[in-house]
Amino acid sequence: MPFVLRIALPVPLPTLFDYLPPANGTASAGSRVLVPFGRNKSVGVVVQVNVPAQVGNAKLKRVLRVLDDAPLLDAELMQTLAWAADYWLGAPGEAYANALPLLLREDKPLPETQEPIWQLTIAGRSALDAGSRRGSSRVLLQTLLAAPLSAAELDTSLPDWRPAARRLADADLIERGEPAPAPNFFPHAPKLALHTEQETAIAAVTEAFGRFQPFLLDGITGSGKTEVYLSLIERTLAQGKQTLLLVPEIGLAPQTVRRLRERLGVPVEVLHSNLAEGERARAWLRMRAGEAKVVLGTRSAVFTPLPHAGLIIVDEEHDGAYKQQEGFRYHARDLALVRARALQVPVLLGSATPSLESLANVEAGRYRALHLRSRPAATHPPQVQIIDMRAQRLEHGLSPALLHAVGETIARGEQVLVFRNRRGYAPVLLCHHCGWHAECPRCEHPLTLHAAWRKLVCHHCDLQAPAPPSCPACGGQDLKPQGQGTERLEEALTAHFQQVPVLRIDRETTRRRDAFEQLLGSLAEDAPAILVGTQMLAKGHDLPNLTLVAIVGVDEGLLSVDFRAGERLAQLTVQVAGRAGRARKPGRVLLQTHHPDHPLLHTLLAQGYAAAAKTLLAERRQTRLPPYGHQVLLRCDAHQRAAVDAFLAEACAALPAGDALQIAGPMPAPMPLRAGRQRGQLLIESASRRDLHAAVRPWSVQLAQLPSARKVRWSLDVDPIDLY
């Protein structure tokens, strides 16, 4: 038998592929290669070399070309990715592809690690002198007049510079220049005085440098977690080591990177999906080469090479955004822990509202807890108050007491956040005459009214339709929007408080690149304003003049059938409440509910998140739900319900018999129809993670060979955070 290369290709198949070595060049594990695949060509990653082939030469194809002089993925990343594909039962090719920026998954030369700069042309200087350009184009010309700048530097100083750059480049007024030498950064942000708890946390993590130790930094909002991160990164840099800092959302990246650059005095690489692919690839390669020392990124940044690793930090570790919900369904927080163990570095998980999984790991002695319970001397925890909505006359879902509190806050020249975790104008459009309501024909779920677009939108499949002028069923004119989304709250508050700006911050208003930062930047620090927003505003943003937070729609979390709903509601409530009173002015939080006596609310308000989490953990232990039980969810969908039912029945029958597994289903998904496809699922549970994986690993390979598998789309989700 010949010796072959075993290669991971970016296809959703649970296997590696054997190829003969290339006619020219040598491939190593971790190198990219170009191979024939079907009628096309594909870029893959070499996983093993000199492996005995399982078939004869005649059936094997040859690698066309080796794309890298040296392995692109080092031994640690290769080992981690193999573990991740095995644990999350993913296709190995998809796992390895996830580790590479998109530009590096193509048959193209590696980009230069030094980023090109933008500079004025002679014509650009003339246009600036003549005053022939206005608005953002003129601002960009003026900025580049002082000095040529890289894209990363422009992202910091002028977040919305790209459209203007395209216009000016087309007119030959600016041009790309040779890469500039690495900028000389000088720290110019003052260090804040540390309180005792911060010093204790920093000392504990510093003492663990050079070995694996997970820490949970459990710090109330406003207690200075970021200052702990900054101090630890400074100490890591002093040792010549690299730091990976993960944040859950793109919206948190610009303000965080600005603070890091101002404080640390070194370039900070950024990795998230809003960056141009060339920038992402260059940042990734600079970290791989050891040229860069600090990288800040969202979920996929967990795959960044760290040849000189010193520290890994996961901020807001509880956030569900760290879980990938499509394709290779990894969890970035958990993968950060695996990488830290392989790299022998400490990993710091930070949150004001730690996940129950992390708290259970502290309880079991696997993580070491660090607590920040005090705020700076000038700040005080916000006062929290429940508003009983029962028997009150509501105005667009807002109680008189809430509106009165908003009015008082505005009169003092302060700012208000009205939080509603539902975008759009209204979740239901109803005919008051006959009872008809607008429903998505592909999902059998109410369509959300977006009044500004005059459209009905399905938030599950994105189907859009014009809002009807009259009832399609009876022709009546009495169409009523039911419920409140952020758009409707914005309209109501604008009408009620005409003298102050009302800003809505949700997915619709922040679609454009850097729109989030621009909206927050438009707020005058010392002027009154009202913010209406979804969970995008729940964390990480310091608004010193924001003193009142009003949370609308609490009851949906209290009444949900999802066993994680209580945890999410408690976390969201505390995170949103943490936006109030972060500076010298006292903060106040109002919770509107029809269930003021609910035990979760009472525990949360009277004793705080830690007590609420302890109660929730006790419930999970009693019911053997995560983190005291372990789950794998098989999802599938097809155009016909019969195909779904047949596949799930065969899948269930293929599971090994025994007492180690508990099986729920087959059953329709909680949302049985989505985007015109019938959906079903099978939930496999076990008290032992080892027993669960031992049973499910061979079963996952069998699934693809079931006769009914070709008629459905199916996926496995290990440790699912969403059963929908």
Image (cartoon, rainbow, N blue to C red):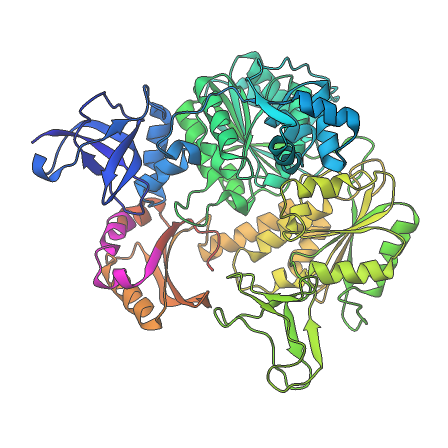
Q: Is residue 719 visible?
A: yes
Q: Nearer the viewer, residue 134 or 97?
A: 134
Q: Position of residue 431 (x, y in %)?
A: 66, 80
Q: Nearer the viewer, residue 388 or 490?
A: 490
Is 522 or 24 nearer to us in this picture?
24
Read off the magenta span: 696-714
Residue at 24% from the left image edge and 49% from the top image edge: 698
Magenta includes 77? no
Q: Is residue 447 above or below residue 362?
A: below
Q: Position of residue 398 (x, y in %)?
A: 78, 64
Q: Position of residue 696 (x, y in %)?
A: 29, 50
Residue at coordinates 87% horizontally, 51% vertically from top-left? 500
| Residue 319 vertical placement versus 278 (above, below) | below
- Drawn side of residue 499 relative to residue 471, left or right: right
The dominant secondary structure in magenta is helix
Quarter of the image where the N terminus is located? top left
| x and y, in percent, of residue 510 in the image | 65, 47
The image quarter containing residue 515 is top right
Instruction: Tell me if 224 is positioned left or right of 36 in this view.
Output: right
